[in-house]
Amino acid sequence: MKKWKPALIIMLLVILLSVFFFFVPLDNIVKNIPVIKSFYKNTTLDITTPNGKATVKIDGKEYGDTPVNITNLVAGTYQVELNRTSQKEGFYKPHFFNIELTKNSTSRINMEIGPGDYLHGVVLFYIEDKTIESGKGKIMLTSSADDAKVYINDEYFDTTPLTNIVLEKGEYSIKLEKTTFEDLEFPIVVSAGHVLNIKGYQFPLPITFVTEKKDEQ
């Protein structure tokens, strides 16, 4: 019986460790070890807000006012909070964006913030996908305007949402059009072996009311 005890203990340890690493991937543990952590700080997040300044918080930590370029974040999922500054308190509400940062990639938020829920701009981030054919990548595209027309390099492609669209790696121009919404145009870079997630936001066009003049008597 005594001879079986070490083997039984080893078997139990193997099972426990297997279960532990199944639910907690080894990569997540290694990248949080202080000495090794610096090697995982290889993602970049670029945040701009045209026509205004906004304070930036990432997972509750302040990063100053836009434009902000952060180059030392560990790969993972983050919540970005943008709060446009204004002389009138409460005129702009804070906006939150969930974004996934993949190692050796650059993610981008370029967002014009209007009053209320109005946003105009784009959120871009990559997710690694080893199943994609060599030399190609994918895009996934949604828009705040349903069924917006999508143009790739000025050629009509389809309407939103787009899912798992395979493209050759390289630079492209994307344009979103929807009646009663402002057009949105922006550049993208398709990276080989990655899915580029794109979320577009379009301002609604102001409604103009036309009143008929009564004939003068």
Image (cartoon, rainbow, N blue to C red):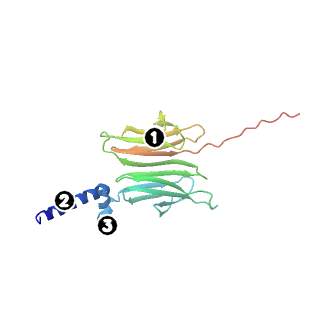
Answer few, some or many: residues within 10 Å of disc 3's Cα (few below 14, many 20 plus, some between 14 and 19): few
Q: Measure the alpha-carbon separation of dots 3 and 1.
A: 40 Å
Question: How many numbered marks appear?
Answer: 3
Query: In the image, what residue occupies the spot 51% across and 55% down?
Result: 96
- Residue 122 lies, in percent from the top left, at 49, 47
Q: Nearer the viewer, mark 2 or mark 1?
A: 2
Of marks 3 and 2, which one's residue comes earlier in the chain?
Answer: 2
Decide if residue 38 is in sight here: yes
Q: Which residue lies under the disc numbered 2?
A: 11
Query: Horizontally, is 207 left or right of 165 in the view?
Result: right
Identity, as a three-letter code, of the amino acid under mark 1: Ser
Of marks 3 and 1, which one's residue comes earlier in the chain?
Answer: 3
Query: Horizontally, is 60 left or right of 117 in the view?
Result: left
Q: Which residue lies under the disc numbered 1?
A: 173
Q: Which residue lies under the disc numbered 3?
A: 34
- The numbered disc on residue 60 is none
Q: Quadrant of residue 32?
A: bottom left
Identity, as a three-letter code, of the amino acid under mark 2: Met
